[in-house]
Image (cartoon, coloured by chain):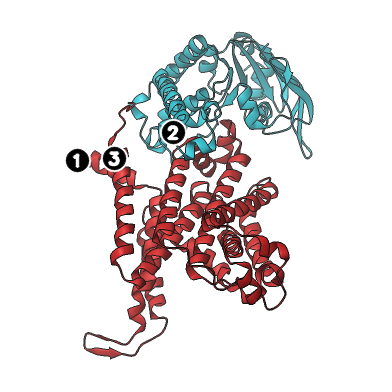
Amino acid sequence: MILEVCNITKKFGGVTAIKDTSFSVKSKEIYGLIGPNGAGKTTMFNIITGNYQPTEGAIKFHGQRIDGVKPFKIVHRGIARTFQNIRLFKSMSVLDNVLIGFDYQANYTYLESIFRLPRFFGEEKRIKKRALEILEILGIEQFANELSTSLSYGSQRKVEIARALAANPQLLLLDEPAAGMNPNETHELAELFFKIRDQLDITILLIEHDMKFVNHLCDRVMVLDYGKTIFEGHIEDAIQDEEVIKAYLGDFKHA
Amino acid sequence: MMNDAIFTRDRLINLALIVTTIWFIWFAQHFFDEYTIRIINNVAIFIILAVSYNLINGITGQFSLEPNGFIAIGAYVTAILTVDAEGMLYQYDIEDPYPWILALQSNFGWALFFSGTISALLALSLAFPVFRVRGDYLAIVTLGFGFIIRILAINSPEITNGSLGINDIPEFSNLYWTGGMAIFTVIAILNIIYSKYGRAMKAVRDDEDAATAMGINTFKIKTMAFTTSAFFEGIGGGLLAALLTSISPDLFTFFLTFQLLIIIVLGGLGSTTGAILGTIFVMAGLEYMRFLDEPMSLFGFETDGTPGMRMVVFSLILILVMLFAREGLMGKKELKDLFKKKKANK
């Protein structure tokens, strides 16, 4: 088990966003977190990445508790994420965006950068080379020196994924990666995720609404509704499940 | 993609710029009149101040109003370290100086170093409470800090000679010191900007949450930018003290910060090239527009001298710049980016 979410409850004042939810993700699995709007999916992401503290429960990564650890330190341990609405660094080039992900892996000090000592050049060269490799895997290396915001929507999504990959994660959290994409792009994206899992040995946890996409991609899913787990298991069973249908389509008997 | 040659085009341009600047300093020192040298000295010191202020305000995007405080500290440290005991005993009228103040002596180089270091240490201690929370608290705290420093300077005559200030500071600042420090500051700040630390600072400015999600310790990065900025502002203050030869608390009011803010906004927040251009434009411009205050004949009309006329014209120019170049003269671009653009257009 790479990630274990144990009995997480999250309350915002009187509102319970997530109620006693548990699930676990196996290594090299693609796990889907689905559910209608406001079900608490993104809240769950924010809890895993340390942006929110759970009211109750524990998060374990490789068996070690990570709830209460500072968000940037969780990244250093190997969990990286993308955002639902693209959040690139707008004033920076695509390459610089990806290099930000390498920040904690570049091994030189402040003074070494001020006086441009040899280690600075060595490390910069190393991370630049690796950043370009990542851009190549995602097929956007030709945009390396473009301004990040000048790219098309689909390419910007890829830059965000590249940036997350640069942080050298073992677990990648993707918040609605296929939102706003056409079927062709979605298909391409799914192939990309298989590639990321198989070539880079990265486990993927994703939030998604596109059922076809989820069906094609995910090994297992969990369905959340109003902060409660209503289903966990394989996607084929999920679409048959009455609770799930009720949550998505409303409560009416066998239409 | 990677360029392994030692003499790349960028590096040659940088080298040419540095050599030209050094030659210019030498030339100015030998051939220009005293008035011009004075202006260039002023511009050099304000380049130090503006470029370092830009690091926290423009690059890291943390709106702060601290320069006058740190410049004051730098100026006082240099003044105390370089004025000899005899001179101090003679000047300190309100209270006798503390014995340890008299004992503190050093040469000008070390004095500047201590000016920077003490400012930086103070910045570090300010950063801890301020950067724990997000938002514009830094602006408020640093604004208050500037006032506190001034009030402290007025109310501790044993150290600073109160509102009388310290006079007869040896005039160490010449073009080699101010110009040399300006070159060093610009190179150091640019080296920071074009490293992982500079990238992280820009990331914090663009989107702090995303920066955290990329594993950046935003608290540490902001503290680094703030402390570095204070270090160079301290040095700038020291140079200023040794150029003016007399300092008093009234020199370091909020107006000084305001002037620097105008410079970096005019030049383009986030651009070091812009900060340098802004300094030259504002400092030299204010000086050379003095003719506007004097009587002159305009298209046959004789006008009386109107004191303050240059400020009116200057404000108009500022308004025009803000109207037609919303992001300042350079925006976020550096000299390097301008060359690139030209290449792409060809």
The residue identified by callout 1 is B346
Q: Residue B244 versus residue B14: which sits nearer the camera?
A: B244
Which quarter of the image is occupied by the N terminus of chain B? top left
Question: Which type of secondary structure does the marked residue at label 1 adopt?
Answer: loop
Q: CA distance from mark 1 to mark 2?
A: 25 Å
Q: What whole-number distance in Å separates the C-alpha atoms at marks 3 and 2?
A: 23 Å
Task: Give the residue displayed 58% in from the left and 57% down from the top.
Answer: B106
What colour has chain B? red
Q: Residue at x 48, y 37 (%)?
A: A113
Q: Residue furthest left?
A: B346
Q: Nearer the viewer, mark 3 or mark 1?
A: 3
Residue B296 visible in rendering: yes
Determine whether the residue tagged by mark 3 lies in a helix, strand or loop.
Answer: helix
Pointer 3 and pointer 1 on the same chain: yes
Viewer-nearest residue: A130 or B42:
B42
- The kind of residue on which mark 1 rests is Lys
Residue B331 appears in the figure: no
Q: Disc 3 and disc 1: Cα gap in Å?
A: 21 Å
Q: Is tag 3's residue or tag 1's residue first in the polypeptide sequence?
A: 3
Tell me, by letter, which chain the rendering colours cyan.
Answer: A
Chain under callout 2: A
Nearer to me, B81 or A164: B81
In this view, the residue in front, B273 or A80, is B273
Amino acid type at circle 3 is Leu
In this figure, which residue is indicated by the disc labeled 3?
B12
